[in-house]
Amino acid sequence: MNNQKGFSGKNVSEVTVESIRRGDITLDDVRIHPETLAMQAQVARDNGNPQLAENFLRAAELTSISDEVVMGYYDALRPGRSTPQQLIEIANELELKGAIKNAELFKQAADVYARRGLAAK
């Protein structure tokens, strides 16, 4: 495990309390890499958990998007926060960013929220 690299390329073994105190470690040094999430998805799939695998793959798509934008997406998915049209607009935005699995999730949410009365008025 010590030869694994974080998003920034630093070895995991370089991430120590002392290196954090010195300021040698940034958020990118501890941010998970999309390839790691893809490998976790394969492990989940191999162990009979396809739903978890899909969650890991959606997370991998989001690693290139800023935390602020991702939190905005999360907030938009909360029941009563978005109209179906707003969710479709986010889906289109996600497709442009290459986050196809996330775009599909938003399209499904738009449909389900409309049918179940969970959409914003």
Image (spheres, grey):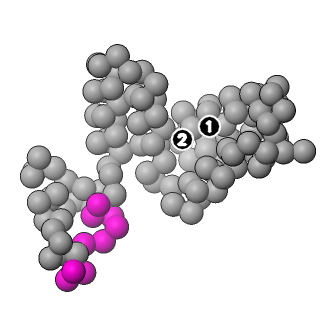
Q: Residue at x 82, y 25 (%)?
A: 115
Whether residue 54 is in magenta: the answer is no
Whether residue 28 is in magenta: the answer is yes
- Secondary structure at badge 2 equals loop
Tell me if residue 112 comes above or below residue 119 in the rendering: above
Provide residue 50's location: percent of width, then percent of height.
42, 21
> How many numbered marks have been drawn onto this rendered protein structure?
2
Which quarter of the figure is the C terminus placed in?
Answer: top right
Tell me if residue 21 comes above or below residue 62 in the rendering: below
Tell me if residue 32 comes above or below residue 109 in the rendering: below
Q: Residue at x 45, y 42 (%)?
A: 59
**Residue that badge 1 annotates:** 103
- What range is drawn magenta here? 21-30
Q: Residue at x 41, y 36 (%)?
A: 56
Q: Is residue 75 left or right of residue 33?
A: right
Residue type, numbered disc 1: Ala
The answer to which quarter of the image holds residue 84 is: top right
Farthest residue, direction right: 121
Could you tell me if residue 89 is visible in this image? yes
Q: CA distance from mark 2 to mark 1?
A: 6 Å
Dot 2 and dot 1 residues touching (CB under 8 Å): yes
Provide residue 52's location: percent of width, then percent of height.
42, 29
Provide residue 120's location: percent of width, then percent of height.
84, 45
**Residue that badge 2 annotates:** 99
Could you tell me if residue 24 is visible in this image? no
Residue type, numbered disc 2: Ala
Q: Main secondary structure of the magenta part?
A: helix
Q: Is residue 16 left or right of residue 101?
A: left
Provide residue 66's location: percent of width, then percent of height.
51, 60
